[in-house]
């Protein structure tokens, strides 16, 4: 039987299922799996346990697409049973790894019978987020490693089967097939504590639910504040914020006291191979659980490695480097997506604008998914219901997300309900409007086809200047992290480029693609806190400015490379990112005249890149960059007058000369001409 360990359920999706099929145990694992085709939202206003008033949000327009809830214990037993039946496999328990020799593929273990050293042909570390094998790699030269914790932790609770719920309203269990809640969904109590806290629940085969609190440590709705409460106060707290669970959690207080509060960590590293040793799974890329992909990504590691070994004729050492080099970008991509999905689950799933965005997205997928799967498949579907590599899924998902945001901005939800067929005809393709039974929001499909896909009928509206929509988050810390990850040698080589990059630098740019993609995405974040003091003075250090210039040069050089190679979409996002990086450098609160000067220099760099790439961009790509450049106030760029006045006051107080105002204005006059020239080039495409 299964003894101890964490009881949190696991979400199994197609990537994990594909690996289990390759191992020959999929049928055994899936026998007790419970399908969850959507989320079931519990508003804070919901006060009874009948299930009426919950909101169902399907994951996909295809009802067959579902995440599977599986028992961690049951899955572990199935894997161990399969391993025991495999020739050459020996399983040993109570062996704690204390030392690893990476070059000889040997490991030393502390056991109940004393210390023992084992050696193999190769050593593969699948020993979790706090891996002993990875720790040994961290002691070697040029091994990149980072770990970051969320400000939130988690704690498990329990909803028992109906027979153990004496206060459950009559008829509920009959309605839900013997469960106290609908088992065909991931239950979410979102938006608690001002949007910082949530609870989820997954169904179990024994008719119970495993609940997990995801709360910040700090704050009035955080573990630090709630854990010290008395038993009565704790019960009152849950009655107030999770009122419909009053009849569902009779052991709330006992579970809350007994179960630990655990942290949520993301681990990134490279390379995954040293000597004859390799790491994979959580040892190489631990992620937070909010996309339900931690186990699936690890299983996919195993499948990909096994396939590569088989294709090589059993040359395990020969495929170690190709394996990790192929996987690391995908691991970083799912790590980013998991963190982003935390914000979505916790804050956005109850937001009307977000829900409308999802309706439009599913409408586009339903209408165009079969015809244009490369462009019309949503991110969640790509991650959870396909084996498309995570990095490709992230790129394609972001592109579609940008399109859906543009469609939703053209046709807000209120307007969608008001428009008659004649009005829709003015916005899109006539052919799709002949479907009289289509829901109102499905009428945005012709706009989607026209805006992104070039039309699916005779009419195609002109592309207008449209900037990529902002995303939530603060970019300052991400910029600093990316600067460190890219490394000084690479950044120095980029800084020396005057024309097209050399072949060797092109290879480096390719190798750093996932980091540069993250950089372009970070420029869209709606905030940028550099972590600088609020009280600027003449002695204030501005260490971020040199890093900002280096990152802008990376976007510039990579944009030119991508445009020349035919990837105008990615190139235009790089150029637009330079403008937004300038905006972040000079955003409100950045008072230094030096920051203004750097921002203006970046704006000039963006203008030069736009002119260079304009002929390689299509109309939509030109419109993306044009909109960013036009967003800058060329009459008073980045509040120059106010900055000059502050500089005069600060300089007088410090007894030093102020900035040369005429020099500043002349500098911008030149940049303004460059920006205006770039806008004209983008409008004309020449």
Image (cartoon, rainbow, N blue to C red):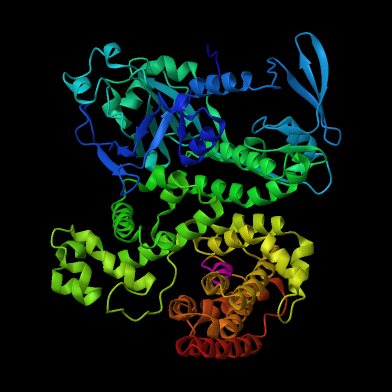
Read off the magenta span: 581-588
Q: Which residue is drawn at 71% across and 56% down?
A: 484
Q: Is residue 534 visible?
A: no
Depicted 116 relative to depicted 57: above or below: above
- Of residue 486 and residue 65, the one placed in the foreground of this image is 65
| In magenta stretch: residue 45 | no
Q: Tell me the quarter of the picture where residue 490 sits.
A: bottom right
- Of residue 281 and residue 494, the one placed in the foreground of this image is 281
170 displayed left or right of 144:
left
Depicted 68 relative to depicted 550: above or below: above
515 displayed left or right of 452:
right
Q: Residue at x 43, y 77 (%)?
A: 620
For this orientation, the residue located farthest to the top is 113
Where in the figure is residue 559, as x and y percent of width and height? 61, 74
The overriding secondary structure of the stretch rendered in magenta is helix
Q: Tell me the quarter of the picture where residue 662 sits.
A: bottom right
Q: Which residue is drawn at 54% across and 81% down?
A: 616
Where in the figure is residue 434, as x and y percent of width and height? 16, 67
Q: Is residue 17 visible?
A: yes
């Amino acid at each position: 039987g299964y003894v101890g360990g964490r009881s949190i359920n696991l979400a199994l999706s197609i990537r994990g299922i594909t690996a289990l099929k390759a191992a020959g145990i999929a049928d055994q694992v899936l026998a007790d799996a419970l399908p969850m085709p959507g989320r079931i939202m519990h508003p804070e206003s919901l006060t009874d346990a009948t299930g009426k008033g919950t909101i169902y949000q399907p994951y996909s327009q295809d009802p067959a697409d579902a995440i599977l809830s599986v028992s961690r214990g049951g899955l572990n037993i199935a894997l161990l049973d399969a391993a025991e039946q495999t020739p050459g496999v020996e399983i040993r328990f109570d062996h704690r790894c204390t030392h690893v020799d990476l070059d000889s593929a040997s490991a030393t273990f502390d056991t109940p019978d004393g210390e023992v050293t084992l050696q193999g042909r190769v050593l593969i570390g699948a020993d979790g987020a706090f891996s002993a094998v990875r720790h040994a790699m961290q002691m070697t030269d040029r091994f990149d490693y980072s770990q970051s914790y969320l400000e939130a932790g988690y704690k498990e609770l329990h909803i028992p089967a109906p027979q153990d719920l004496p206060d459950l309203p009559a008829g509920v269990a009959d309605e839900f097939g013997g469960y106290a809640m609908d088992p065909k969904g991931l239950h979410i109590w979102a938006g608690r504590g001002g949007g910082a806290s949530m609870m989820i629940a997954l169904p179990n085969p024994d008719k119970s639910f495993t609940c997990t609190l995801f709360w910040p440590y700090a704050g009035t709705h955080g573990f630090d504040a709630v854990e010290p409460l008395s038993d009565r106060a704790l019960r009152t707290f849950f009655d107030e914020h999770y009122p419909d669970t009053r009849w569902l959690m009779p052991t709330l207080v006992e579970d809350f006291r007994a179960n630990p509060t655990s942290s949520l960590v993301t681990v990134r590293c490279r390379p995954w191979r040293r000597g004859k040793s390799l790491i994979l799974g959580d040892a190489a890329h631990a992620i937070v659980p909010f996309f339900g992909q931690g186990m699936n990504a690890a299983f996919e590691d195993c499948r990909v490695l096994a396939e590569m070994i088989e294709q090589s004729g059993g040359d395990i050492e020969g495929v170690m480097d190709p394996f990790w080099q192929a996987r690391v970008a995908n691991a970083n991509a799912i790590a980013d997506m998991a963190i982003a999905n935390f914000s979505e689950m916790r804050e956005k799933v109850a937001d009307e604008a977000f829900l409308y965005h999802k309706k439009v997205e599913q409408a586009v997928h339903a209408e165009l998914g079969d015809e244009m799967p490369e462009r019309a498949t949503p991110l969640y579907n790509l991650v959870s219901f396909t084996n498309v590599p995570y990095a490709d899924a992230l790129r394609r998902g972001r592109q579609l997300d940008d399109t859906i945001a543009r469609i939703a901005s053209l046709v807000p939800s209120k307007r969608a309900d008001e428009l008659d067929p004649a009005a829709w005809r003015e916005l899109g393709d006539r052919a799709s409007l002949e479907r009289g039974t289509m829901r109102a929001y499905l009428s945005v499909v012709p706009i989607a086809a026209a805006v992104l896909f070039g039309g699916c009928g005779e009419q195609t509206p002109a592309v207008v200047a449209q900037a990529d929509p902002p995303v939530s988050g603060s970019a300052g810390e991400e910029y600093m992290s990316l600067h460190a990850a890219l490394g000084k040698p690479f950044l120095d080589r980029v800084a020396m480029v005057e024309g097209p990059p050399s072949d060797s630098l092109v290879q480096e740019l390719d190798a750093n693609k996932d980091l540069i993609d993250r950089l372009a995405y970070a420029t869209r974040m709606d905030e940028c806190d550099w972590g600088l003091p609020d009280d600027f003075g003449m002695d204030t250090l501005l260490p971020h400015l040199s890093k900002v210039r280096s990152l802008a040069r990376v976007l510039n050089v990579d944009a030119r490379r991508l445009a020349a190679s035919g990837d105008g979409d990615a190139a235009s996002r790089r150029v637009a990112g330079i403008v937004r990086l300038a905006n972040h450098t000079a955003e409100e609160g950045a008072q230094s005249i030096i920051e203004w000067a750097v921002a203006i220099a970046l704006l000039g760099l963006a203008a030069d890149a736009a002119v260079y790439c304009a002929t390689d961009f299509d109309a939509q790509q030109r419109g993306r960059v044009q909109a960013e450049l036009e967003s800058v106030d060329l009459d008073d760029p980045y509040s120059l007058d106010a900055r000059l006045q502050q500089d005069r006051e600060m300089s007088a107080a410090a007894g030093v000369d102020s900035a040369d105002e005429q020099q500043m204005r002349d500098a911008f006059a030149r940049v303004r001409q460059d920006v205006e020239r770039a806008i004209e080039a983008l409008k004309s495409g020449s």
